[in-house]
Image (cartoon, helix red, strand yellow):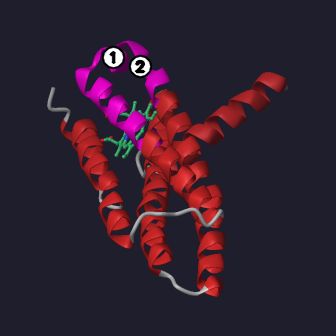
Protein backbone atom coordinates (compact mmCIF):
# COMPACT_ATOMS: atom_id res chain seq x y z
CA UNK A 1 0.00 0.00 0.00
CA UNK A 2 2.70 2.50 1.06
CA UNK A 3 4.96 1.81 -1.99
CA UNK A 4 1.90 2.25 -4.25
CA UNK A 5 1.12 5.55 -2.56
CA UNK A 6 4.77 6.69 -3.04
CA UNK A 7 4.62 5.70 -6.71
CA UNK A 8 1.46 7.76 -7.15
CA UNK A 9 3.04 10.83 -5.49
CA UNK A 10 6.18 10.41 -7.62
CA UNK A 11 4.10 10.10 -10.81
CA UNK A 12 1.97 13.14 -9.92
CA UNK A 13 5.02 15.30 -9.18
CA UNK A 14 6.68 14.23 -12.47
CA UNK A 15 3.45 14.73 -14.38
CA UNK A 16 2.77 18.17 -12.91
CA UNK A 17 6.32 19.40 -13.65
CA UNK A 18 6.08 17.89 -17.17
CA UNK A 19 2.65 19.48 -17.69
CA UNK A 20 3.97 22.85 -16.58
CA UNK A 21 6.77 22.49 -19.11
CA UNK A 22 4.29 21.23 -21.76
CA UNK A 23 6.24 18.20 -22.82
CA UNK A 24 5.69 14.42 -22.54
CA UNK A 25 6.80 12.57 -19.44
CA UNK A 26 10.00 10.79 -20.45
CA UNK A 27 12.09 9.29 -17.69
CA UNK A 28 13.52 11.01 -14.61
CA UNK A 29 14.13 14.67 -15.29
CA UNK A 30 13.40 15.86 -11.80
CA UNK A 31 16.93 17.12 -11.04
CA UNK A 32 17.09 19.12 -14.27
CA UNK A 33 13.57 20.42 -13.75
CA UNK A 34 14.32 21.40 -10.17
CA UNK A 35 17.40 23.33 -11.30
CA UNK A 36 15.30 25.27 -13.81
CA UNK A 37 12.78 26.13 -11.08
CA UNK A 38 15.57 27.26 -8.76
CA UNK A 39 17.07 29.33 -11.59
CA UNK A 40 13.69 30.93 -12.33
CA UNK A 41 13.29 32.01 -8.70
CA UNK A 42 16.94 33.12 -8.60
CA UNK A 43 16.22 35.48 -11.51
CA UNK A 44 12.97 36.69 -9.86
CA UNK A 45 14.90 37.45 -6.65
CA UNK A 46 17.59 39.28 -8.68
CA UNK A 47 14.91 41.43 -10.37
CA UNK A 48 13.36 42.37 -6.99
CA UNK A 49 16.79 43.14 -5.52
CA UNK A 50 17.68 45.43 -8.42
CA UNK A 51 14.29 47.14 -8.42
CA UNK A 52 14.98 48.14 -4.80
CA UNK A 53 18.68 48.91 -5.25
CA UNK A 54 17.86 51.22 -8.20
CA UNK A 55 14.98 53.00 -6.45
CA UNK A 56 16.59 53.49 -3.01
CA UNK A 57 19.36 55.91 -4.16
CA UNK A 58 16.71 57.73 -6.21
CA UNK A 59 14.90 58.32 -2.90
CA UNK A 60 18.22 59.58 -1.48
CA UNK A 61 18.37 62.11 -4.36
CA UNK A 62 14.91 63.48 -3.49
CA UNK A 63 15.58 63.25 0.24
CA UNK A 64 18.81 65.28 -0.07
CA UNK A 65 16.89 68.00 -1.97
CA UNK A 66 13.92 68.04 0.47
CA UNK A 67 13.56 71.21 2.53
CA UNK A 68 10.61 70.60 4.86
CA UNK A 69 10.54 68.21 7.82
CA UNK A 70 7.32 66.45 6.74
CA UNK A 71 8.92 65.36 3.43
CA UNK A 72 12.13 64.29 5.20
CA UNK A 73 10.20 62.15 7.69
CA UNK A 74 8.23 60.55 4.86
CA UNK A 75 11.43 59.71 2.97
CA UNK A 76 12.91 58.09 6.08
CA UNK A 77 9.89 55.75 6.30
CA UNK A 78 9.92 54.98 2.55
CA UNK A 79 13.64 54.22 2.57
CA UNK A 80 13.41 51.98 5.62
CA UNK A 81 10.47 50.00 4.24
CA UNK A 82 12.11 49.58 0.84
CA UNK A 83 15.40 48.47 2.36
CA UNK A 84 14.00 46.11 5.01
CA UNK A 85 10.92 44.91 3.15
CA UNK A 86 12.30 44.33 -0.35
CA UNK A 87 16.04 44.97 -0.84
CA UNK A 88 17.44 42.83 1.98
CA UNK A 89 15.01 39.86 1.69
CA UNK A 90 15.62 39.76 -2.10
CA UNK A 91 19.40 39.93 -1.62
CA UNK A 92 19.22 37.01 0.85
CA UNK A 93 16.98 35.01 -1.54
CA UNK A 94 19.36 35.72 -4.47
CA UNK A 95 22.39 34.46 -2.54
CA UNK A 96 20.59 31.36 -1.15
CA UNK A 97 19.13 30.38 -4.53
CA UNK A 98 22.45 31.10 -6.30
CA UNK A 99 24.28 28.88 -3.81
CA UNK A 100 21.64 26.19 -4.37
CA UNK A 101 22.29 26.45 -8.13
CA UNK A 102 26.03 25.94 -7.55
CA UNK A 103 25.24 22.82 -5.49
CA UNK A 104 23.82 21.12 -8.64
CA UNK A 105 27.33 21.03 -10.14
CA UNK A 106 29.91 22.47 -7.72
CA UNK A 107 32.98 21.09 -9.54
CA UNK A 108 32.03 22.88 -12.77
CA UNK A 109 30.87 26.19 -11.29
CA UNK A 110 33.72 26.56 -8.80
CA UNK A 111 36.33 26.04 -11.52
CA UNK A 112 34.72 28.38 -14.07
CA UNK A 113 36.56 31.75 -14.37
CA UNK A 114 33.33 33.57 -15.34
CA UNK A 115 31.77 32.38 -12.08
CA UNK A 116 34.73 33.72 -10.07
CA UNK A 117 34.34 37.09 -11.81
CA UNK A 118 30.58 37.00 -11.20
CA UNK A 119 31.02 36.27 -7.50
CA UNK A 120 33.48 39.17 -7.18
CA UNK A 121 30.86 41.51 -8.66
CA UNK A 122 28.24 40.04 -6.29
CA UNK A 123 30.54 40.85 -3.33
CA UNK A 124 30.85 44.46 -4.63
CA UNK A 125 27.06 44.58 -4.90
CA UNK A 126 26.72 43.44 -1.29
CA UNK A 127 29.19 46.18 -0.26
CA UNK A 128 27.01 48.70 -2.15
CA UNK A 129 23.96 47.27 -0.34
CA UNK A 130 25.74 47.80 2.99
CA UNK A 131 26.60 51.43 2.08
CA UNK A 132 22.93 52.04 1.32
CA UNK A 133 22.16 50.92 4.88
CA UNK A 134 24.79 53.32 6.29
CA UNK A 135 23.39 56.24 4.26
CA UNK A 136 19.87 55.34 5.34
CA UNK A 137 20.98 55.65 8.98
CA UNK A 138 22.62 59.04 8.30
CA UNK A 139 19.42 60.40 6.78
CA UNK A 140 17.37 59.00 9.68
CA UNK A 141 19.63 60.72 12.24
CA UNK A 142 19.66 63.98 10.26
CA UNK A 143 23.41 63.63 9.63
CA UNK A 144 23.51 63.56 5.83
CA UNK A 145 26.11 65.98 4.46
CA UNK A 146 26.11 64.90 0.78
CA UNK A 147 24.31 66.72 -2.02
CA UNK A 148 21.66 65.29 -4.35
CA UNK A 149 24.29 65.40 -7.13
CA UNK A 150 26.42 62.84 -5.23
CA UNK A 151 23.43 60.50 -4.98
CA UNK A 152 22.72 60.86 -8.70
CA UNK A 153 26.18 59.42 -9.41
CA UNK A 154 25.88 56.87 -6.58
CA UNK A 155 22.64 55.70 -8.25
CA UNK A 156 24.54 54.70 -11.41
CA UNK A 157 27.01 52.32 -9.70
CA UNK A 158 24.77 49.17 -9.64
CA UNK A 159 24.06 49.60 -13.38
CA UNK A 160 27.65 48.55 -14.12
CA UNK A 161 27.41 45.57 -11.77
CA UNK A 162 24.18 44.44 -13.43
CA UNK A 163 25.73 44.72 -16.91
CA UNK A 164 28.83 42.80 -15.82
CA UNK A 165 27.00 40.01 -14.00
CA UNK A 166 24.38 39.35 -16.69
CA UNK A 167 27.01 39.31 -19.48
CA UNK A 168 29.18 36.94 -17.43
CA UNK A 169 26.40 34.43 -16.70
CA UNK A 170 24.79 34.50 -20.15
CA UNK A 171 27.77 34.95 -22.54
CA UNK A 172 30.33 33.22 -20.28
CA UNK A 173 33.18 34.98 -22.15
CA UNK A 174 35.97 33.08 -20.35
C1 LIG B 1 26.03 34.69 -4.29
C2 LIG B 1 25.31 35.10 -5.31
C3 LIG B 1 25.03 34.30 -6.55
C4 LIG B 1 25.33 33.00 -6.87
C5 LIG B 1 26.05 31.96 -6.00
C6 LIG B 1 24.81 32.74 -8.20
C7 LIG B 1 24.92 31.55 -8.90
C8 LIG B 1 24.33 31.28 -10.11
C9 LIG B 1 24.43 30.04 -10.85
C10 LIG B 1 25.23 28.81 -10.39
C11 LIG B 1 23.72 30.16 -11.99
C12 LIG B 1 23.54 29.11 -13.11
C13 LIG B 1 24.47 29.54 -14.24
C14 LIG B 1 24.40 28.67 -15.46
O1 LIG B 1 24.44 27.44 -15.34
O2 LIG B 1 24.34 29.21 -16.58
C15 LIG B 1 23.14 31.49 -11.99
C16 LIG B 1 22.33 31.98 -12.99
C17 LIG B 1 22.01 33.29 -13.12
N1 LIG B 1 22.34 34.31 -12.26
FE1 LIG B 1 23.24 34.10 -10.44
N2 LIG B 1 24.22 33.89 -8.67
C18 LIG B 1 24.35 34.87 -7.70
C19 LIG B 1 23.93 36.18 -7.80
C20 LIG B 1 23.41 36.76 -8.94
C21 LIG B 1 23.18 38.16 -9.14
C22 LIG B 1 23.45 39.25 -8.11
C23 LIG B 1 22.67 38.31 -10.40
C24 LIG B 1 22.27 39.55 -11.16
C25 LIG B 1 22.81 40.71 -11.07
C26 LIG B 1 22.56 37.00 -10.99
C27 LIG B 1 22.05 36.75 -12.24
C28 LIG B 1 21.88 35.50 -12.78
C29 LIG B 1 21.20 35.23 -14.04
C30 LIG B 1 20.55 36.28 -14.94
C31 LIG B 1 21.28 33.85 -14.25
C32 LIG B 1 20.68 33.06 -15.42
C33 LIG B 1 21.77 32.79 -16.46
C34 LIG B 1 21.31 31.84 -17.56
O3 LIG B 1 20.71 30.82 -17.28
O4 LIG B 1 21.56 32.13 -18.73
N3 LIG B 1 23.03 36.07 -10.08
N4 LIG B 1 23.53 32.15 -10.85
Residue visible at 65% across and 60% down? 85
Q: From which residue to which does the magenta span run?
A: 101-126
Q: Are marks 1 and 2 in contact (CB under 8 Å)?
A: yes
Q: Is residue 80 left or right of residue 152?
A: right
Rendering coords of residue 116 (x, y %)? 31, 24
Q: How many marks?
A: 2
Alpha carbon distance from label 1 to label 2: 6 Å
**Relative to 20, is 10 above or below?**
above
Rendering coords of residue 140 (x, y %)? 64, 64
Q: Which residue is mark 2?
A: 105
Decide whether residue 110 is among the magenta residues: yes
Residue visible at 41% across and 62% down? 54
Residue visible at 28% across and 45% down? 166
Q: Is residue 93 left or right of residue 58?
A: right
Quadrant where the N terminus is found in the figure:
top right
Residue 82 occupies which quadrant of the picture? bottom right
Tell me the quadrant of ligand 1: top left
- Dot 2: what SS? loop
Amino acid sequence: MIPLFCDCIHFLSCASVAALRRRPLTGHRITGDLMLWVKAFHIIAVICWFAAIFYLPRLFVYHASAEDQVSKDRFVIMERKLYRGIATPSAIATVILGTWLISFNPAYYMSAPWMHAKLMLVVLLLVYHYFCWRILGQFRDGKNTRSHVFYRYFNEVPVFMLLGIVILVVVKPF
